[in-house]
Amino acid sequence: MTDSSLTYHEFDDCLWIRCTSRGSFVNSPALKTIAEKYMARGGQTVVVDMEICPGVDSTFMGTLAGLARRMMIGGGALQIAAPTQRTRAAMESLGLDMLVEIDPGNAPWQQNLQERRTMVTTGSSKEASAGNMNELERTRHVLDAHNTLRAMNPKNNEAFGYVCETLEEDLMRHEAELSDKE
């Protein structure tokens, strides 16, 4: 399964990722891949522009949380630009506002926000792709995202405990099926 809802451009001061559809388990692997490559090159600031993103699922938010944690360890930051009220409320309800900076007023990109968006949408940007994940890889990704959410807030542990148990069972079943084929 692939998705082309993320475009990105590397500016001097940050990696800008624009989400043009719902942030979900489908496009979160691509988000993770491009942000990790940027961090591996020493990048310190990732901005996820959610101006036209209608919503996010828990896997996408868990992926954001995991990236934010890794960036904080290296002295960097993950910032969210222009989330809808619904998206902001979803992130805050899970405690992401403790890890990510949502619409920080003092961020350098606030001064030329429209110019950056134009740059990302006019073809000088790249389309994000995490490649084709198989079912086992996707299950691991979704489980990792939910375990990240569980670890950051006791309330999330209760909310996602059953989801993680189910995903762990799916993972064991997929791994057993692979072993049987060998």
Image (spheres, rainbow, N blue to C red):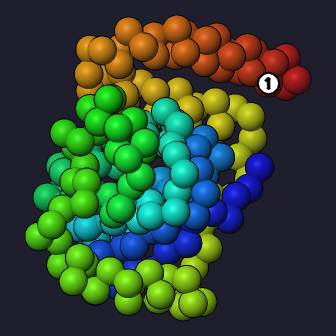
Name the amino acid type tagged 1. Leu
Count of numbered circles on the image: 1
Disc 1, SS = helix
Answer few, some or many: residues within 10 Å of disc 1's Cα (few below 14, many 20 plus, some between 14 and 19). few
Q: At 47% across and 53% down in the image, what residue appears? A: 32
Closer-to-camera residue (134/148): 148
Residue at 28 percent of width and 71 percent of height: 43
Residue 77: quarter of image: bottom left
Above or below residue 63? Residue 44 is: below
Figure quadrant of the C terminus: top right
**x and y percent of residue 165 in the render?**
54, 10
Residue pointed to by mark 1: 178
Residue 30 as seen in the image, left or right of residue 2? left
Task: State the residue at coordinates (68%, 65%).
Answer: 4
Q: Is residue 80 visible?
A: yes
Residue 86, horizontal then vertical, whole percent = 43, 42
